Amino acid sequence: MANLDDITDMTTLRAEIDALDRDLIALFARRRQMIDCAARIKQTQDLPARIDWRVEEVVMNARRNADAAGLDPDLFEAIWRRLVDAAIEQEDRQLKGSRP
């Protein structure tokens, strides 16, 4: 990753953003694998896909992390609520025996 102070043109900056986006997608793919693992564990322990206290814990962690990084915590709360909802839908499908 280039030092931002060394970037002087939009082509280079766009390439750096594109590379970062690829890294973010790879991290989301890894997170999805972890959600599959969570569903497997929940199935063996007869747990539901949605555990309300955990949803709130994950979202509040995202808010705190965003705020600590100088980002808008409201925005990242909204993003993480959607991310968690999608993860719960994924787990629910797996717990019911179907995959997307």
Image (cartoon, rainbow, N blue to C red):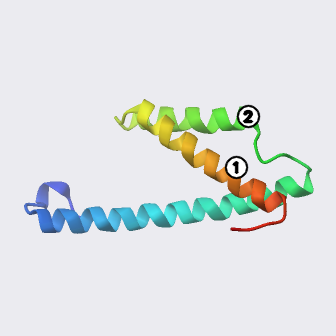
Q: Tell me if I can see residue 1 in this picture.
A: no
Q: How far across and how far down the image is residue 65, in percent?
A: 47, 37
Residue, x 14% and y 68% (percent of image)? Answer: 11
Q: Which residue is found at the position 44% from the left and 60% from the top? A: 24
Residue 18 occupies which quadrant of the picture? bottom left
Q: Residue at x 49, y 33 (%)?
A: 63
Answer few, some or many: residues within 10 Å of disc 1's Cα (few below 14, many 20 plus, some between 14 and 19). some
Amino acid at the residue labelled 2:
Asp
The answer to whether residue 54 is left or right of residue 6 is: right
Query: Which of the numbered marks, if any, corresponds to residue 2?
Result: none
Disc sitting over residue 52 in the figure: 2
Q: Position of residue 91 (x, y in %)?
A: 74, 55
Judge the density around disc 2: few (<14), some (14-19), many (≥20) Cα neighbours within 10 Å.
few
Q: Is residue 99 above or below residue 91?
A: below
Q: Quadrant of residue 12?
A: bottom left
Corner quadrant of residue 58: top right
Can I make out residue 77 in this image? yes
Residue drawn at point x = 57 percent, y = 40 percent: 81
Q: Is residue 68 left or right of residue 55?
A: left
Lower position in the chain sequence, tag 2 or tag 1: 2
Amino acid type assigned to the residue bearing label 1 in the image: Ile
State the SS at label 1: helix
Q: Is residue 57 above or below residue 3?
A: above
Where residue 54 appears, x then y in whole percent? 71, 37
**Closer to the camera in the image, 23 or 1:** 23
- Quarter of the image where the N terminus is located: bottom left
Q: What residue did someone put label 1 on?
A: 88
Separation of disc 2 and disc 1 at Cα? 11 Å
